[in-house]
Image (cartoon, helix red, strand yellow):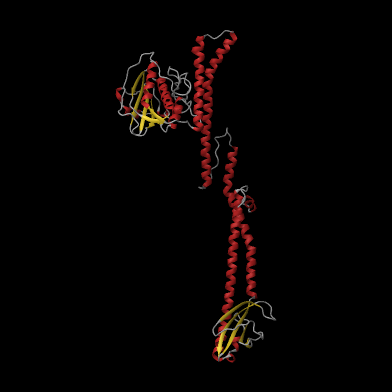
């Protein structure tokens, strides 16, 4: 059906649900009642016709029986008398002569009937010369003395047909009234049903970014509209939470960028006012660290923004986790700030080696910040999962903060922020692990105790964060597990591992990422 036809029959998409429902109901009721009316009239016509034929057939049979027994002259005049649904009766021979008839009957046959004995014939819509109206007739053949006769019983149909036309007129008058009442009922019912939707619409139109705490009304009826209102309120609650997180994120990002900007601008203003050049020591110890801090924040923000928009793009190749752990341990030992204790076993996963290295480095640098003297990097693996646990001997993380710690710019109960952290390191770790189909979590005390004294490297006494990777297909791991439990502290000045993660250098002081970060939607 074309668009023009749809609009012509009231089915265009521009009409509202209420109007379309009303039109549809009117059409359905009209068609249904029309069909019912036509069927009823046909059945009434057939019933009336059968009733007239039964009456005339009964009278014709009675007279034909008398003719067959005693001849035409033996027919009782009472049998020819009108009544009981018969206007008159004629007895006609083969030559078309009326031999006997009811009083007042025509002198000529009403129709030509040449019938054998016992054969019926019916005629409808007969017109009789000299009489008004239409008639129906039943003729029955009879035989007596070798002569054949036709007994014709006739009944007037005017009154019966008039009653049928009156019934049709009544149906024609009632039909539009019933259709109008049905359409009105549907219109009112749909309007009443959609009234909660109108209230929801008005409420939603009144909600803006500054009024996300408002909710739409929920109707009492347990139906689809209640489900719609409940779903709408759930969506508004999520928008409110995300809006709050976005505002906090913007505020925290502004705060993080304001401090280094203030330092840089202060020094530049001082140099401008005094007319003196900045000395290399000030540039090296103050300006460059602050500029690099801003660069790290911007780089991390861009990475998280890309992750939020389309997810991180992962180039999946075989990654040897043991090589990544050994490289990271070598880097930390070169820093000489903490004891590094490792447990390394051969484990291979499918992933992006650059992202895996960045996730591990962010965890390690986060642990270094809070470690008093010792850092643990432990590996565990089974047939399906490879795990890296990074722990420290610092103050640990409370149970309520173990989820919030992966939010962007989150503040824990005790804010232990180091001035050089971006506040986004663990959020990046979480995005990387999600992109790899793995997970990152803070281990509770029971999980840490279950690790035991892994590889004789002692027990983690502070916070422990675990990376879980899916293993590469069987057969890809190197044969034989190799363990490297170490407790020695490397001398300062050892060569550092090369930077293998995207973005700016994380520095070698272990203070570029941190455990406190916030959520951005």
Q: Is residue 288 visible?
A: yes
Query: Picture quarter containing residue 25?
Result: bottom right
Residue at x 62%, y 85% (from the top left corner) = 90
Q: Where is residue 420 in the image (x, y as percent from the top left)?
A: 47, 18
In the image, residue 34 above or below residue 213: below
Q: Can residue 337 be seen in this view?
A: no
Q: Position of residue 57 (x, y in %)?
A: 57, 80
Q: Where is residue 474 in the image (x, y as percent from the top left)?
A: 34, 34
Residue farthest along the right direction in this orientation: 130
Query: Picture quarter containing residue 359?
Result: top left
In the image, residue 130 above or below residue 491: below
In the image, 206 versus 487, the foreground residue is: 487
Q: How many marks?
A: 0
In the image, residue 16 above or below residue 504: below
In the image, residue 56 above or below residue 516: below
Left or right side of 370 for 115: right
In the image, 424 versus 357, the foreground residue is: 357
Q: Where is residue 366 in the image (x, y as percent from the top left)?
A: 42, 22
């Amino acid at each position: 059906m074309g668009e023009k036809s749809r609009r012509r029959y009231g089915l265009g998409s521009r009409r509202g649900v209420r109007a379309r429902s009303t039109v549809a109901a009117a059409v359905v009721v009209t068609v249904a009642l029309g069909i019912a009316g036509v069927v009823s009239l046909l059945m009434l016509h057939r019933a009336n016709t059968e009733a007239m034929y039964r009456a005339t057939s009964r009278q014709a049979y009675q007279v034909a029986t008398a003719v067959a027994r005693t001849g035409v002259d033996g027919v009782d005049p009472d049998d020819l008398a009108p009544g009981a649904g018969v206007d008159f009766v004629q007895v006609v021979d083969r030559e078309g002569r009326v031999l006997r008839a009811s009083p007042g009957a025509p002198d000529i046959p009403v129709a030509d009937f040449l019938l054998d004995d016992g054969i019926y014939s019916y005629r409808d819509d007969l017109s009789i010369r000299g009489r008004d109206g239409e008639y129906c007739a039943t003729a029955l053949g009879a035989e007596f003395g070798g002569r054949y006769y036709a007994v014709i019983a006739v009944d007037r149909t005017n009154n019966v047909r008039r009653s049928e036309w009156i019934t049709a007129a009544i149906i024609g008058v009632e039909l539009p009234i019933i259709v109008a009442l049905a359409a009105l009922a549907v219109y009112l019912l749909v309007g009443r049903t959609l009234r909660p939707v109108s209230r929801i619409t008005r409420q939603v139109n009144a909600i803006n970014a500054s009024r996300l705490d408002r909710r739409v009304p929920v109707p009492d009826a347990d139906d689809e509209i209640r489900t719609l209102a409940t779903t709408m309120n759930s969506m508004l609650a999520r928008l409110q939470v995300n809006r709050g997180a976005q505002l906090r994120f913007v505020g925290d990002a502004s705060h993080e960028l304001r401090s280094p900007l203030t330092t840089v601008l202060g020094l530049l203003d001082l140099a401008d006012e005094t007319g003196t050049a900045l000395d290399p020591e000030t540039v090296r110890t103050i300006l460059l660290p602050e500029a690099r801090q801003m660069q790290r924040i911007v780089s991390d923000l861009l990475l998280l923004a890309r992750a939020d928009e389309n997810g991180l793009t992962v180039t999946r190749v075989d990654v040897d986790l043991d090589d990544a752990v050994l490289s990271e341990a070598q880097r930390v030992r070169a820093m000489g700030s903490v004891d590094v204790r490792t447990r390394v076993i051969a484990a291979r996963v499918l992933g992006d080696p650059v992202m895996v290295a960045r996730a591990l480095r962010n965890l390690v640098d986060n642990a270094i910040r809070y470690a008093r003297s010792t850092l643990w990097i432990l590996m565990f693996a089974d047939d399906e999962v490879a795990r890296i646990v990074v722990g420290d001997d610092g103050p640990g993380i409370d149970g309520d903060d173990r989820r919030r710690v992966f939010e962007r710019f989150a503040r824990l109960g005790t804010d232990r922020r180091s001035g050089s952290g971006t506040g986004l390191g663990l959020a990046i770790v979480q995005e990387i692990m999600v992109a790899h189909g793995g997970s990152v979590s803070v281990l509770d005390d029971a999980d840490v105790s279950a690790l035991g004294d892994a590889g004789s490297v002692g027990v983690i006494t502070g916070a422990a964060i675990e990376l879980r990777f899916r293993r590469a297909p069987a057969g890809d791991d190197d044969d034989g597990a190799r363990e490297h439990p170490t407790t020695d502290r490397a001398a300062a000045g050892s060569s550092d591992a090369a930077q293998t993660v995207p973005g700016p250098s994380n520095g070698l002081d272990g203070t570029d990422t941190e455990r406190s970060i916030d959520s951005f939607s």
